[in-house]
Each structure stands twice: as C-alpha cells, then as structure tokens.
Amino acid sequence: MPTPEIRQVEDAEQLSTAAAEECSRIMRVAIGRQGRCTFVLSGGSTPRRLYELLAAPPQRDQIDWTRVDLFWGDERAVPPDHKDSNFRMANEALLQPLSIPATRIHRMPAERADRDRAAADYQAEIARVFDVPADGVPPAFDLVLLGLGPDGHTASLFPRTAALNETRRWVVPNHVPQLGTDRLTMTRVILNRAACIMFLVAGADKAAALAEVLEGPAESERLPAQLIRPETGRLVWLMDGAAAARLKTSTGTVVSYAQ
Ligand code: 6PG
C-alpha cells in the first residue's frame, strides 16, 4: 500500500472545502483521461457539506457531471426517501441540484427484503457499468469517499460483524447488532481496488478512533477502518483539528498505518 496522505485542516468547513477541491481535481483528471469518473459516495452526515460545495460554483462548473457515475459505499435498509437514507442525503445535496442523469445514478437498493439478492444485483450493476464480469476481479473506482465512526467503522463495516471477513463478494448484506439494523455495504474486496480512497473525519468524537486506526496496533476486527488499504491507489485522510487532537505525530508526516 502506498504511504497514506494525512492532511489536517482547521475546522469542518475547511475540511469540506479542501475535500471539494481535491474531489473536483480527481474527477477532472479521470474524465480527461478516460472520458468518465466512477465516484463512490459516503453516507452519514459529514459529507453533506462537501456535496453542497460540489453542487455549487466554482466546483459545479469545473466538472462535466454528465460523465460522472455515482455509487454508494453503503446504505441503510430503508427506502430511498427515508430520513436515514444515504441516498436521500446525496439526492438533496448533490443529485437534484446538479440534475445528475438517472443513467449515472447507481443507487444501492438496501430497502429490498432479499438483501442477498440486492447485494448481488448491485454487484452486477457495478460490473455492467465497468463492462467486466460480475464474478471476476473487482474493478477500480476512480474515487471512494469514506467516513469514520467513533467505533472505528467505515462504510457499514462495523466492528465484529460478518462483512469484515468477506474475501470474495464486492457487496454484501451486513447485520449490525450494535445498532439493531441491517445494511448493504461494499467490502474491502472492491474498496481496496480504488485509485483513490478519501476518508473525511471531523469532530472531537472521532479523535480517539482516528488515533487508534492510524497509530495503534492492527486490530481490524475492532477497528474496521484499518481494513482499508488500497492495493495501488492513494489513501487520503482529511481531518479537522478536533478529530486530529489525539494523534501523536504531527499530521502531514507518515504515520505508521497499522501493518
Ligand atoms: C453510514 C456511513 C458511515 C459514516 C460514519 C461517519 O451509512 O453511516 O457510511 O460509515 O460514514 O458513520 O458518519 P458521520 O459522518 O455522520 O459522522
């Protein structure tokens, strides 16, 4: 895995601004190089401001959004208009303001009762977009956004849940006993193939988990974000001062990412 890039900014607004500038640059390069960008959105609350900035000048006008394929790294088992839906948040902040074409929106259907089938169908959708076999080597997304939970989870890869041990499927259902909920989530099998994975971490409630993930021993069952180790792509950790407060090393240097 290439050396992680650790970048600290002052506060959550600067985090969103820095993320928007970097995401915009990555998308423009991908579109220039291959005619499109495949972009995996994160859920939760942190990325909402980033999505709003991407949907507003100047970023909005610097990207040909008709060439961006949007996916989700995970989704809650709720309808797409539910208040907890990751799709709904992105739809309000990004998809509708930019009038993203429906053909470019690849929603994760986690509301379906048969979540195994839904996961397999989403994997088939990913394979179709990349024009690769759905049972072959996972394709490489150009950009994957991820968040970090206070418990060290990312996407819907929660501590000590079954999805952590998946070694074959790109997308799986995952029951989260800690929350008493069910999710669909991409697994490390496909996430780690990405050309760039960007973690957005803001707030003091993430400081302990962030320090353990970046500087603590390898304990991925307890800290699933440690599973995210791109094979050849960039790993970017963008954090605000509050989230970085417990880091021992000054950011910008290479921390010993758990081996
Ligand atoms: C989800 C996300 C999840 C999120 C973290 C951080 O569906 O909840 O995919 O992994 O990124 O829980 O969430 P916040 O940004 O709300 O702190």
Image (cartoon, rainbow, N blue to C red):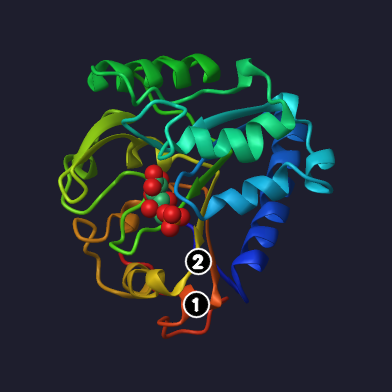
Label 2: which secondary element: loop
Amino acid carrying mark 1 in the image: Ala
In the rendered structure, find residue 202 and report the number of the disc placed on it: 2
Amino acid carrying mark 2 in the image: Ala
Label 1 crowd bin: few (<14), some (14–19), many (20+), radius 10 Å: some
In percent of width and height, residue 165 lies at 19, 42
* Residue that appears at 57% across and 30% down: 70
Callout 1 touching callout 2 (CB < 8 Å): yes
Q: Earlier in the sequence, mark 1 or mark 2?
A: 2
Q: CA distance from mark 1 to mark 2?
A: 7 Å
How many numbered marks does the figure carry?
Answer: 2
In percent of width and height, residue 152 lies at 31, 61
Quarter containing the N terminus: bottom left
Toward the viewer: 121 or 91? 91
Mark 2 Cβ inside 8 Å of ligand 1: yes
Residue highlighted by disc 1:
242
